[in-house]
Amino acid sequence: MNLYMPALKFVWNRTKHIDAKRMKKEKYPGGIEEFCNIPYIEDGNMYHLLDVYVPENTEGKLPVIIDIHGGSWMYGTKELNRCYCHHLAKEGFIVVNINYRLAGKVFFRNQIKDIFAAFKWVSENMGDFPADMNNVYLTGDSAGSHFVSICAALSKSEELRKDFDIPYNPLQFNAIGTTSPVVDLTSRNIPLNPNLTRLLGSNHKLSPFYKYMKFDEVAVEDMPPFYIVTSSGDFVRTQSYKLKNVLDHLGVENKLMDCKFKYKGKKLPHCFAVLNSNARPSAVVRKEMAGFFKQHIK
């Protein structure tokens, strides 16, 4: 563990540097009005803020997408996905981009409670925007995809929500979008297992929340349809197929988009569609996901 913490600090400092360079180069599509840093919990904590992105000159009401950023449960803010969310909004959605407290400061159960507090804010405040609250979607990348998958199950199960002391479900989701999802942290085949102690505590296998680290143990039959994205260079690519297998077994509608091809001679990396939202393959995936969501408009 003594070696793990310095290594972890090095990795995230390097990642922060790479992300800063990436975000400086991002090109925004234009035509999106931003409402930024809105508190969904009034406690002054920057991790309890969200943004709302609305296409300009909107006539009538638009469906809503809530986006949850990745970062191995312990890194990042909503700003990582800001450009991606602008592009999603251009597909004809209002997009809500949320922060949540990070592992290392709080445990997994607190992160889920943050996310449901953001859902509650959305359910109570979107009347201030041209939002069609009959059509709400949820998407996330990497660790964010783990969150959205768990939230899909929680949204349909009062019994599971009791584990988090969440008394009611503020939103129903028409469909779920997962990009480079991680749905089994107990697997020995991914380099994410050290995160378990930061998510659950030192005796993580004894935690009542350990079952949430393996999605098939908490998935329920009546979850919304899932759209799953992975790619040729996704280091957790097999996890997308695990997710599909779980959904197929339960009879939950799903579509897997595995981008096996190379782009400019290179394999498409983990979360490429989010982290390089200006590239052509990202635009293709984004439009496909938006089309999948629109197929499920009420």
Image: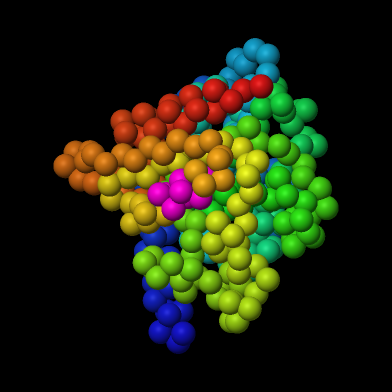
Percent position of residue 130, x then y: 70, 22
100 or 192, nearer to the observer: 192
Which residue sits at x=46%, y=46%?
244
Which residue sits at x=49%, y=43%?
248
Percent position of residue 51, x then y: 63, 40
Span shown in magenta: 240-247
Percent position of residue 292, x then y: 50, 28
Residue 92 placement: quadrant: top right
The quarter of the picture where the C terminus appears is top right
193 or 38, nearer to the observer: 193
Q: Furthest-bottom residue in view?
A: 2
Indicate whether 152 appears above or below 32: below
Which residue sits at x=61%, y=65%?
211
Specify whether 167 is left or right of 136.
right
Indicate whether 102 appears above or below 126: below
Percent position of residue 23, x then y: 41, 45
240 or 248, nearer to the observer: 248
295 or 242, nearer to the observer: 242
Examine the rendering and report whether any part of residue 41 can be seen. Answer: no
Which residue sits at x=59%, y=77%?
204
Examine the rendering and report whether any part of residue 91 can be seen. Answer: yes
Magenta span: predominant SS is: helix
Magenta run includes residue 241: yes
